[in-house]
Image (spheres, coloured by chain):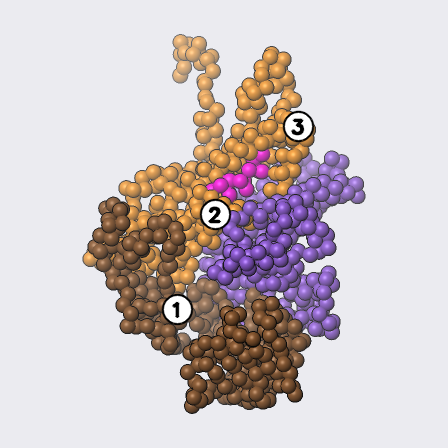
C-alpha cells in the first residue's frame, strides 16, 4: 500500500508541472493588453510602462515563468491587479465557501444517490424502481442554473411563511458574519502561511464555529447553502443513483452472493454486507470524476444564488484580465482536483486489493 | 406448416445486418425506446422548424406587448389577440418560435462538438497507442493535464482566450472533451493490437494503416458511439451554461441557455420565459442520455447480464 | 480620533466664484500629502499648522496651495476656477483625514478601507467582502442622528433576486427594482414604492477611429436611425425620458437642456448612408 501511494505521488509530478505550465500559458494567451484593460481610459504609454514594469510583464516569457515558479515555492501568488491585495488572501476569503458548497453537494449527492440506488436495486422492476430511475434520468438532464433559479423561487417565495422557507441568496443573513479568528485569538495581523491559515479557517464556517462556538452562524450558513448544494448536487446524485443500482445488480448476480443467500442471510444483509463493498468501487470513482462537475456547477450556482465564492471571482477575473488572480485560482482548482483524484485512486486500491498489485 | 420444398431455403442463414439487429434490441430496451422517440421528435422539429414556428425567431414584433404570457386560442385566449403558444419575450419576440429554432442550434452544437472531439481524440489515441514510448507518454500526460481541470472552467478559460461567441464555445467544449475519447481509443487499440486476428493480418502482409483502420478501430466504434451520445448531452448542457454566463451564443441567436441568461430577471413578472427554454434543454439532454444508456446496454454485451 | 466636522460654503465670500474657497471646519484635524513624484512642493509646519503649496501652476493640477489657517480652518487656493469644487471636496475619496490615521496606514488605500476613520452618521463595523457591509450608528455625529442603530448593505446584480429578498422579508429595502417588477411591487400591500431621481444616462459611444465609424456621415446616419423614444418606452421604468444631454436633467451644473439632439428620422438616416457611399435596402 505505501508503495502504491508513493508511486501515485511520483506520477503526480509531471502532471502538476503540466498544470502549472498550462495555467501560466492560458493567462498569457488571453488577448488584450492587460494595461489597457486594467486602466481603461487612463492608460497612457507612460503609465503603461510603469504598469508593465511593476508586474514584470516586460521580461521575456522564460524569465516570467522562472520567476513564477520561484514565487510559487515561497507561496507568493502575486497581487490582484484590480484589488491590489495578495491573491493568497483572496483565495483564503473565497475558497472556503466553494469548498463548503462542494462538500455539502457531495454529501447530498452521495447519500441521496446511494439511497435511491439501493432502494431501486432492492425493489428492482417494481414501480418504485421505475420512479426512482425516472427521477435520476431527469436529474441528470437538468441544467444546474435552471434548477437553481426554480429552487430559489419555490423555496423563498412559494414557501414563504412556512417553516420550510429557505433564503434565496447570500451566504449569511444580514448582520451575521464569521468572527475573525485573528481577533478571537488576539493575534496581531498574522502574515505568511500562518496568516493564510488563520484567514482560511475564519472563513470556513465549520471550523470557525467549532473554535468560537457561534452555532447560530453555523445553522444560518447551512440554511443558505442547502438550495445551492441541491442544485449543484442533482446531476452527480442521479449519476450515483444509477451507478449504485447497476453495480449492485451486477454484483448481486454473482456466485458468492448466491452462496450468502443460500446460507440463509436476509436480503438486507446480503446487500449491506457483501454487495455494497464491491459496489462502492465504481461509486468512489464517480465521486472523483464528479468533483470536477461539482466545481463547475459551483460556478453557475454561485452566480444564481449570489454567493461570494471562488467560481464567480474566477470568472470576473478572467473577464477583467486580472492575470495573477486567474493564474492563482486556476492553479488551486487544478491542485484540488488532482488531489481528489489521488484520494479516489488510493481508496480504490483500499477497497479492491487487486488494484494495489498493478 | 412448412412443406419439404422450403427446406433448402430454410438452410440458407437469414442475413441480418448488425445495425438492424442493434436497432431491434434498442427498441426493446425501454430507455432506448424513450430516447429514440424523444430524439426523433427533436430532429423532426429541427428539420421542419420553419414550418412549425409561426414567426421568425429573431423578428421583433413591434406592435405587440412585451413579456406577454402565453396565449393559446384553444385554451381560452380571445381570438382577437395574436396567438403566442409560449408567450413573448422581453424583446417582443415569439418565444415558441425561438424555442423551436433553438432545437437546431442545440443539435448542431451537440453533434459538432462531439464530432470534433471524437475525430481529434481518435487520432491522438490511436497514434499514442500505436507509437508507444515517449510519444505515448507525452500525449497521455497532456490528456491528464487537460483532465486536471473541471471541464466547464477549462471551457470558460478557453473561451476567454478565443473570444466569446457560439463557434468559439463549440471549440472550447470540443477541446475539453478530447481527452475522454483519446483515452478510450488508446485503451481499445492497446487491447486489440496484440490479439491474434491482428497478428494474422500482419502476417498476411497488411500495412499498418490498413490494420489500424480495418481491424482495430472498428472495435472502438461501439464505445465511441456510446460515449459520443452521452457526450452530446453534456455538450448541450455546457453550451447552455456558457451562453447563460454570456460567454457562448451571442444575441439574438435563439439558444436556450442564452434565453435563460437574458431572462433570469423575469422570473416573477414572466415566469414562462424561464420555464419553457429550461424544459426544452432538459428534454433534449434527457433524450440523448436515454439513447446513450440504451446504446450502452445493447451494444456492450458485458452489461446485459445485469439487466437494464 | 476625529471628533466631527461640518463644512459649509461661505457663499457671501467675495471669492466664491471659485478661485479661493474658505471652508470652516468644526474641530477638524488636518493632514494631507501630495504625490511627491508629480509635484515639487514642501510641507511646511508652522506651530502645528501645516501648509503645502506648489511653486507654480505648471504641474497641471488644480491646487496652488492648501493651508491650515488655524486649527479649524483650511484654505484651498486653486489654479483655475472650478464651480464643481464644493461637490468634489465633499466626495468621500477626497475627504480630509486625520493625520495620525494617515501616519498609521501610510496612506495605503486598502488599509484605510479596512479601517476607516470617518465622521459620518454611521461607523463601519465589519466589511464582509463579497457579502455585506455592516454599519452602526455613530453616537458622536455632529448632525441629525442616525434613525436606526444598525445599517447593513448587501448587493446583488439580479433585480429578480433583489425583489425576492425583499418579498421574503430578508431585507428591509432595495434599490433599483427591475422595470417590469414595479407593477408587482405596487400591487403588493406589504411593499411601498418610493420613486427617486435616476442618475443614469444610457448612451452608445462610437469608436471614431475604426471604420466605418470614422466617417462623420455614417455616425450621423446611425444617430438618426435610432428610435430612442421606443427604447425608453419598452425597457425603462415609467418616468424615464429620452435624454438630450450627457447628464440627467436635474443635475446642475451639467445638464444642458437647450442644446438640441438629433431626432429619430429613418429616412434621413438612409439618405446619409447613401451619401456616404453605402447601399440601403
| Residue A272 seen in this snapshot | no
Q: Residue B172 colored magenta?
A: yes
Chain identifier, brown in the render: C
Q: Label 2 marks which chain's residue?
A: B
Q: Label 1 marks which chain's residue?
A: C
- Is B305 drawn above or below residue A88 in the view shown? above
Residue at numbered disc 2? B163
Counting residues from the start of the chain, the first of labels 3 and 2 encountered is: 3
**Relative image position of residue C211 (x, y in whole percent):** 36, 49
**Relative image position of residue B223 (x, y in whole percent):** 55, 32
Cα separation, mark 1 vs mark 2, equals 29 Å
Taking B277 as reference, is A55 left or right?
right
- Is A17 drawn above or below residue A164 in the view shown? above
Name the secondary structure under disc 2: loop
* Circles 1 and 2 in contact, beta carbons < 8 Å: no
Chain identifier, purple in the render: A
Amino acid at each position: 500500500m505505501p508503495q502504491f501511494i508513493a508511486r501515485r505521488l511520483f506520477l503526480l509530478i509531471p502532471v502538476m508541472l503540466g498544470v502549472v505550465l498550462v495555467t501560466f500559458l492560458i493567462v498569457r494567451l488571453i488577448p488584450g493588453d492587460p494595461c489597457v484593460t486594467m486602466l481603461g481610459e487612463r492608460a497612457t504609454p507612460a503609465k503603461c510602462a510603469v504598469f508593465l514594469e511593476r508586474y514584470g510583464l516586460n521580461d521575456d516569457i522564460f524569465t516570467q515563468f522562472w520567476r513564477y515558479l520561484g514565487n510559487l515555492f515561497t507561496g507568493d501568488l502575486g497581487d490582484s491587479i484590480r484589488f491590489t491585495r495578495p491573491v493568497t488572501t483572496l483565495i483564503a476569503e473565497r475558497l472556503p465557501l466553494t469548498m463548503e458548497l462542494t462538500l455539502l453537494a457531495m454529501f447530498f449527492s452521495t447519500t441521496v444517490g446511494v439511497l435511491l440506488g439501493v432502494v431501486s436495486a432492492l425493489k428492482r422492476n417494481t414501480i418504485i424502481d421505475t420512479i426512482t430511475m425516472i427521477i435520476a434520468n431527469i436529474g441528470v438532464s437538468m441544467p444546474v442554473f435552471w434548477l437553481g433559479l426554480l429552487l430559489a423561487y419555490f423555496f423563498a417565495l412559494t414557501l414563504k411563511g412556512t417553516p420550510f422557507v429557505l433564503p434565496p441568496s447570500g451566504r449569511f443573513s444580514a448582520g451575521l458574519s464569521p468572527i475573525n479568528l485573528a481577533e478571537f485569538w488576539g493575534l496581531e495581523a498574522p502574515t505568511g502561511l500562518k496568516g493564510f491559515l488563520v484567514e482560511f479557517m475564519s472563513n470556513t464556517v465549520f471550523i470557525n464555529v467549532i473554535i468560537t462556538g457561534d452555532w447560530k452562524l453555523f445553522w444560518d450558513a447551512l440554511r443558505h447553502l442547502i438550495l445551492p448544494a441541491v442544485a449543484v448536487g442533482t446531476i452527480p446524485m442521479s449519476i450515483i443513483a444509477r451507478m449504485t443500482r447497476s453495480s449492485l445488480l451486477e454484483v448481486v448476480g454473482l456466485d458468492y452472493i448466491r452462496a450468502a443467500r443460500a446460507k440463509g442471510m436476509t436480503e438486507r444483509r446480503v446487500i449491506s454486507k457483501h454487495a455494497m463493498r464491491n459496489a462502492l468501487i465504481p461509486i468512489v470513482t464517480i465521486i472523483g470524476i464528479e468533483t470536477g462537475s461539482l466545481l463547475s456547477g459551483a460556478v453557475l450556482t454561485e452566480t444564481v444564488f449570489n454567493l461570494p465564492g471562488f467560481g464567480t471571482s474566477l470568472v470576473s477575473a478572467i473577464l477583467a484580465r486580472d492575470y495573477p488572480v486567474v493564474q492563482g485560482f486556476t492553479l488551486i482548482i487544478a491542485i484540488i482536483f488532482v488531489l481528489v483524484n489521488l484520494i479516489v485512486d488510493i481508496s480504490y486500491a483500499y477497497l479492491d486489493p487487486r488494484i494495489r498489485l498493478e | 406448416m412448412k412443406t419439404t420444398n422450403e427446406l433448402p431455403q430454410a438452410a440458407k442463414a437469414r442475413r441480418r445486418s448488425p445495425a438492424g439487429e442493434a436497432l431491434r434490441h434498442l427498441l426493446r430496451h425501454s430507455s432506448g425506446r424513450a430516447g429514440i422517440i424523444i430524439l426523433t421528435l427533436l430532429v423532426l422539429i429541427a428539420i421542419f422548424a420553419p414550418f412549425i414556428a409561426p414567426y421568425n425567431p429573431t423578428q421583433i414584433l413591434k406592435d405587440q406587448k412585451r413579456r406577454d404570457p402565453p396565449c393559446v386560442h384553444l385554451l381560452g385566449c380571445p381570438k382577437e389577440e395574436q396567438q403566442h403558444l409560449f408567450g413573448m419575450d422581453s424583446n417582443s419576440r415569439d418565444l415558441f418560435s425561438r424555442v423551436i429554432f433553438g432545437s437546431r442550434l442545440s443539435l448542431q452544437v451537440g453533434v459538432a462538438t462531439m464530432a470534433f472531439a471524437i475525430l481529434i481524440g481518435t487520432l491522438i489515441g490511436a497514434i499514442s497507442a500505436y507509437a508507444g514510448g515517449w510519444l505515448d507518454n507525452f500525449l497521455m500526460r497532456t490528456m491528464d493535464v487537460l483532465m486536471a481541470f473541471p471541464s466547464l472552467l477549462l471551457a470558460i478559460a478557453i473561451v476567454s482566450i478565443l473570444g466569446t461567441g457560439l463557434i468559439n464555445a463549440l471549440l472550447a467544449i470540443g477541446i475539453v472533451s478530447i481527452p475522454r475519447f483519446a483515452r478510450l481509443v488508446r485503451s481499445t487499440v492497446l487491447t486489440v493490437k496484440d490479439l491474434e486476428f491482428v497478428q494474422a493480418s500482419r502476417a498476411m502482409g497488411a500495412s499498418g494503416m490498413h490494420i489500424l483502420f480495418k481491424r482495430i478501430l472498428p472495435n472502438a466504434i461501439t464505445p465511441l458511439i456510446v460515449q459520443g451520445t452521452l457526450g452530446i448531452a453534456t455538450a448541450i448542457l455546457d453550451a447552455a451554461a456558457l451562453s447563460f454566463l454570456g460567454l457562448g451564443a451571442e444575441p439574438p441567436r435563439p439558444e436556450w441557455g442564452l434565453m435563460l441568461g437574458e431572462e433570469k430577471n423575469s422570473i416573477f413578472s414572466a415566469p414562462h420565459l424561464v420555464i419553457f427554454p429550461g424544459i426544452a434543454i432538459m428534454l433534449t439532454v434527457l433524450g440523448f442520455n436515454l439513447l446513450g444508456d440504451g446504446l450502452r446496454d445493447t451494444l456492450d454485451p458485458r452489461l446485459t447480464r445485469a439487466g437494464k | 480620533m476625529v471628533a466631527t466636522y461640518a463644512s459649509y460654503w461661505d457663499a457671501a465670500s467675495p471669492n466664491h466664484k471659485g478661485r479661493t474657497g474658505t471652508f470652516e471646519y468644526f474641530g477638524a484635524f488636518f493632514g494631507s500629502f501630495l504625490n511627491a513624484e508629480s509635484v515639487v512642493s514642501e510641507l511646511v509646519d508652522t506651530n502645528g499648522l501645516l501648509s503645502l503649496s506648489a511653486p507654480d501652476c505648471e504641474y497641471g493640477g488644480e491646487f496652488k496651495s492648501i493651508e491650515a489657517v488655524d486649527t479649524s480652518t483650511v484654505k484651498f487656493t486653486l489654479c483655475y476656477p472650478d464651480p464643481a469644487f464644493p461637490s468634489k471636496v465633499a466626495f468621500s475619496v477626497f475627504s480630509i483625514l486625520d493625520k495620525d490615521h494617515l501616519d498609521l496606514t501610510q496612506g495605503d488605500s486598502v488599509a484605510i478601507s479596512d479601517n476607516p476613520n470617518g465622521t459620518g452618521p454611521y461607523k463601519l463595523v465589519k466589511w464582509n467582502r463579497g457579502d455585506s457591509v455592516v454599519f452602526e450608528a455613530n453616537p458622536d455625529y455632529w448632525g441629525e442622528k442616525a434613525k436606526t442603530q444598525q445599517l447593513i448593505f448587501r448587493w446583488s446584480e439580479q433585480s429578480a433576486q433583489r425583489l425576492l429578498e425583499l418579498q421574503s422579508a430578508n431585507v428591509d429595502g432595495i434599490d433599483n427594482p427591475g422595470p417590469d417588477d414595479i407593477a408587482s411591487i405596487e400591487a403588493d400591500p406589504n411593499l411601498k414604492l418610493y420613486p427617486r431621481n435616476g442618475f443614469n444616462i444610457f448612451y452608445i459611444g462610437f469608436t471614431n477611429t475604426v471604420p466605418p465609424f470614422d466617417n462623420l456621415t455614417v455616425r450621423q446616419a446611425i444617430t438618426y436611425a435610432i428610435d430612442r423614444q421606443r427604447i425608453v418606452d419598452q425597457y425603462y421604468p415609467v418616468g424615464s425620458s429620452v435624454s438630450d444631454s450627457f447628464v440627467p436633467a436635474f443635475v446642475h451644473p451639467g445638464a444642458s437642456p437647450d442644446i438640441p439632439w438629433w431626432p429619430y428620422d429613418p429616412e434621413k438616416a438612409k439618405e446619409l448612408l447613401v451619401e456616404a457611399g453605402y447601399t440601403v435596402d
